[in-house]
Amino acid sequence: MNIRLKFTTNKKMKEMNHENQIQIELTEDVAQGTYANLAIITHSSSEFVLDFIRIVPGVPKAKVKSRVILAPEHAKRLMLALNDNINQYERLHGAIDIENPVGDFTPVGGDA
């Protein structure tokens, strides 16, 4: 079976033909999610690699918690869908401030 996944916006999702929908299973452990406060994106000519990392204050070593590898076309669709969702969020909740640092990750015993 050849399945092609497509990232879409909420608006486009409502317009989709219900006959062509794929049922997607979300297991309980995946539904819990994984928290990340840093993402590193790299790419080659054939793929984009998104590493999601959790940095813990006071711990000098961070771990990659999840890695997602996408074809360039899917990476662009993800970017457009994320942009659409951020715009919707900001209309409801106000602008997201990215001028301030995410948090204080000074190692324990560092400068006060």
Image (spheres, rainbow, N blue to C red):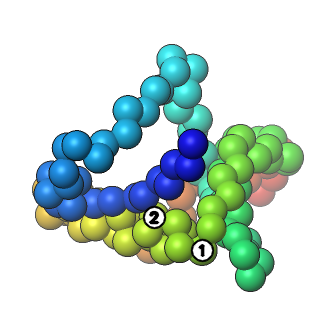
Q: Amino acid at mark 2?
A: Leu
Q: Are marks 2 and 1 in contact (CB under 8 Å)?
A: no
Q: Vertical placement of 30 versus 94: above or below?
A: above
**Which residue occupies the extreme top position in the image?**
28
Which residue position is annotated with label 2? 78
Q: Quadrant of residue 85?
A: bottom left
Q: Position of residue 67 (x, y in %)?
A: 71, 50
**Which residue occupies the extreme bottom position in the image?**
45
Work out whether residue 68 or residue 7 is closer to the camera in this orientation and state it: 7
Q: Position of residue 112 (x, y in %)?
A: 71, 53
Identify the residue shown where x is 50% and y is 55%. 4
| Secondary structure category for the residue under label 1 | helix
For the residue carrying disc 1, how many other residues have a C-alpha within 10 Å: few (<14), some (14-19), or many (20+)?
A: some
In this rendering, would 67 be left or right of 28?
A: right
Q: Position of residue 8 (x, y in %)?
A: 33, 59
Which residue position is annotated with label 1? 72
Q: Which mark's residue is nearer the viewer, 2 or 1?
A: 1
